[in-house]
Image (cartoon, rainbow, N blue to C red):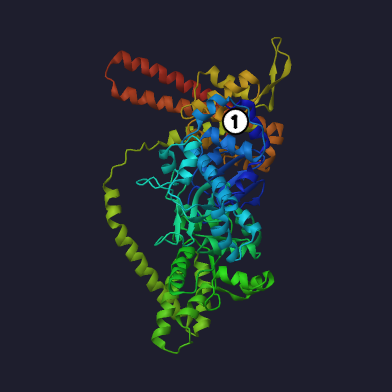
């Protein structure tokens, strides 16, 4: 069991912005930082991080929490494992009962541990075994990879043996079932998956080993050149890019990501001095991989092979990248060269100069390859223009589309309005196709009857008033309110009372409970009554996900004190919390208006009951209750009016 003091220390001392920036490129906006949400697909940043409050919140998908919750979500970790992850990363002593640690490890954590075991073993085999040194290390040296680079990328070797690693892992306490789940042995034969291969470990953004790639070096007949881990509980190949865990910092600094196809392309380019490079190794480029890049930059430069397969893959990647609203560039290498080979033939300066000078936008790349001889064939030109316009249809920003159309118009010396007409025709055709494809799905959806509760207008008002009170309790619960009153001798006195106590007493006096957010309200009040202060992290774990999301919304100032104060008193809303007079009015108004709306709902309920009953005694009772509620409502409304509290 991890002690609460350790958890509190982590929450208080680890900067959440530092942790989040390992996964998302953040830009300062006011007191918060914003970036693209790592939990849902978006093109405009709505993911907010508040360093002061130690929390994050996405205003697009609603996901929010503290630094531990972020790690749990982004790394798919259990609560204890997220704490261990942070403690290890920031060298915080972790005080826990060792006897319970193994029981707390879930299947995912076990795979991480096995992968670490495998990584160390593969590295040891490369550097210390005769087979590894003679076969794998010599091969890497022959390919121009230095010892420093080999160590930097944690490369290893799996011996040409059916069960060398399996036997080693079993001796270390793991079963064949564990190894199958980690993807390190083949399910049917139970043989080592990567035997006879150079090993390229694959890391997630947090730097944990999640999978391996293996390259055959010719010592197994008919073996596939490359082999990758199967998908596991910790590895989804469509989400992962090779080297992004290291390259992300350079990508942000350069505001550009070079995208290649293979492990050795990345390794050779990094060795040559180009650090902002990743690869979609082990799979064709996926939309999820593109989204992962987009978290760190808007600019991507493709560096695919110049053969037919590479060019075809480039065309596919262009449209996928444009779909994500990225700026797309490409670099072509001299005949017979690829990123790996070219990086070894030139100096660092020559390489960076070449990349800068030969980086072209996707339109120019398509023209270079689809019209290689600058042909004057009008039919061929028309086909190329349509191909380019089809790529432009993947862009969602109409201004960017317009600029590209102007560029194409000048490049081909063709009337801009003609291009626009053709582009609109393409867009209409694309839209019609999308509508036809989704028709059957939409038809099914339209036949479904919604069972969701649709709140009434008065319920919406109640919910908003409860949020208003919760906002005050979260931000200003201990702020002192000063009220003029009279003592038992009818002498004027000033009563000083914390805002939370005033709210609690006023609602308790009239026996009013929260309708929608009572659990949150009670937990907050319990904190204040027990400790005379509020520690939000102490109640977060007691709330359901929707309640947690509301708390983070309120903490991140998405719910403001009423703008009507600004209109009424001609004063900026941000000054209310520092203005004793206006703050008193805000708190009184919040409580009294909430009481009024609750009583209004109770009155409506009595009216409904009156309309449904034919019993005269019951009618008389309901009528008396209605009149009492009406009297109380009038008293509250009069107080609001007398004190000029109406919003």
Q: Nearer the viewer, residue 51 or 136?
A: 136
The N terminus is located in which quarter? top right
Q: Residue at the spot x=49%, y=26% of the render?
A: 518
Residue 87 visible (yes or no): yes
Residue 23 visible (yes or no): no
Q: Quadrant of residue 264?
A: bottom right
The C terminus is located in which quarter? top right
Q: Residue furthest front?
A: 130
Q: Which residue is mark 1?
A: 537
Indicate the position of residue 547 as horizontal and vertical percent values.
50, 33
Q: Residue at the spot x=66%, y=51% of the render?
A: 28
Q: Is residue 192 above or below residue 451?
A: below
Q: Quadrant of residue 86?
A: top right
Left or right side of 121 for 385: left
Q: Nearer the viewer, residue 456 or 207?
A: 207
Q: Is residue 595 above or below residue 283?
A: above
Q: Residue at the spot x=40%, y=84% of the render?
A: 380
Q: Is residue 128 above or below residue 333?
A: above
Question: How many circles with numbers are drawn on the protein?
Answer: 1
Dot 1: element: helix
Q: Residue furthest top?
A: 489
Q: Residues within 10 Å of mark 1 (few under 14, many from 20)?
A: few
Indicate the position of residue 437 as horizontal and vertical percent values.
30, 60
Left or right side of 214 for 500: right
Q: Nearer the viewer, residue 125 or 254?
A: 125
Indicate the position of residue 239 as horizontal and vertical percent values.
47, 52
């Amino acid at each position: 069991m991890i002690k609460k003091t350790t958890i509190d220390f982590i929450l208080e001392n680890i900067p959440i912005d530092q942790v989040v920036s390992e996964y998302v490129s953040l830009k300062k906006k006011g007191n918060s930082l914003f970036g693209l949400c790592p939990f849902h697909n978006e093109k405009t940043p709505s993911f907010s991080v508040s360093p002061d409050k130690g929390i994050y919140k996405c205003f697009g998908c609603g996901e929010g929490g503290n630094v531990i919750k972020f790690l749990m979500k982004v790394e798919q970790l259990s609560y204890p494992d997220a704490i261990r992850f942070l403690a290890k990363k920031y060298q915080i002593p972790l005080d826990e009962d060792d006897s319970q640690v193994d029981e707390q490890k879930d299947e995912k954590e076990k795979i991480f541990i096995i992968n670490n075991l495998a990584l160390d073993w593969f590295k040891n085999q490369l550097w210390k075994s005769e087979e590894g040194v003679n076969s794998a290390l010599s091969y890497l040296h022959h390919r121009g990879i230095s010892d420093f680079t080999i160590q930097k990328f944690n490369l290893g070797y799996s011996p040409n043996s059916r069960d060398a690693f399996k036997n080693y892992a079993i001796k270390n306490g793991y079963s064949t079932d564990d190894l199958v789940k980690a993807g390190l042995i083949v399910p049917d034969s139970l043989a080592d998956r990567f035997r006879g291969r150079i090993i390229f470990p694959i890391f997630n953004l947090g730097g944990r080993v999640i999978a391996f790639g293996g390259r055959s070096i010719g010592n197994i007949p008919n073996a596939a050149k490359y082999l990758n881990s199967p998908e596991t509980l910790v590895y989804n190949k469509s989400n992962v890019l090779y080297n992004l865990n290291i390259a992300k910092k350079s990508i942000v600094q350069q505001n550009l990501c070079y995208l290649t196809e293979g492990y050795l392309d990345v390794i050779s380019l990094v060795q040559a001095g180009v650090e902002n490079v990743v690869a979609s190794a082990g799979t064709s480029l996926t939309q999820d991989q593109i989204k992962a890049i987009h978290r760190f930059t808007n600019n991507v430069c493709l560096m695919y092979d110049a053969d037919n397969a590479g060019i075809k893959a480039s065309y596919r990647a262009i449209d996928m990248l444009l779909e994500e609203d990225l700026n797309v560039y490409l670099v072509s290498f001299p005949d017979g060269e690829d990123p790996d080979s070219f990086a070894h033939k030139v100096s660092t300066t020559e390489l960076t100069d070449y990349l800068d000078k030969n980086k072209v936008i996707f339109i120019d790349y398509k023209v270079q390859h689809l019209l290689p001889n600058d042909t004057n064939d009008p039919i061929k030109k028309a086909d190329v223009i349509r191909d380019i316009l089809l790529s432009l249809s993947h862009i969602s920003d109409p201004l960017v589309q317009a600029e590209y159309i102007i560029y194409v118009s000048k490049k081909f010396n063709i009337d801009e309005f003609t291009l626009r007409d053709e582009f609109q025709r393409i867009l209409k055709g694309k839209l019609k196709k999308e509508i036809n494809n989704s028709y059957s799905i939409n038809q099914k959806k339209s036949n479904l009857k919604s069972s969701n509760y649709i709140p009434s207008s008065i319920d919406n008002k109640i919910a908003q008033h409860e949020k208003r009170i919760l906002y005050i309790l979260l931000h200003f619960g201990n702020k002192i309110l000063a009220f003029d009153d009279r003592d038992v001798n009818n002498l004027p006195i000033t009563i000083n009372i914390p805002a939370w106590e005033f709210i609690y007493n006023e609602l308790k006096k009239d026996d009013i409970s929260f309708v929608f957010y009572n659990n949150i309200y009670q937990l907050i009040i319990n904190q204040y009554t027990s400790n005379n202060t509020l520690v939000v992290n102490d109640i977060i774990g007691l709330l359901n996900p929707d309640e947690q999301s509301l708390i983070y919304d309120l903490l991140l100032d998405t719910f403001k004190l009423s703008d009507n104060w600004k209109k009424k008193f001609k004063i900026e809303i941000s000054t209310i919390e520092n203005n004793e007079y206006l703050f008193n009015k805000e708190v009184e108004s919040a409580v009294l208006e909430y009481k009024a709306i609750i009583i209004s709902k109770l009155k409506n309920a009595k009216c409904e009951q009156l309309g449904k009953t034919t019993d005269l005694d019951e009618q008389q009772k309901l009528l008396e209750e209605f009149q009492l509620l009406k009297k109380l409502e009038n008293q509250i409304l009069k107080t609001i009016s007398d004190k000029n509290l109406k919003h």
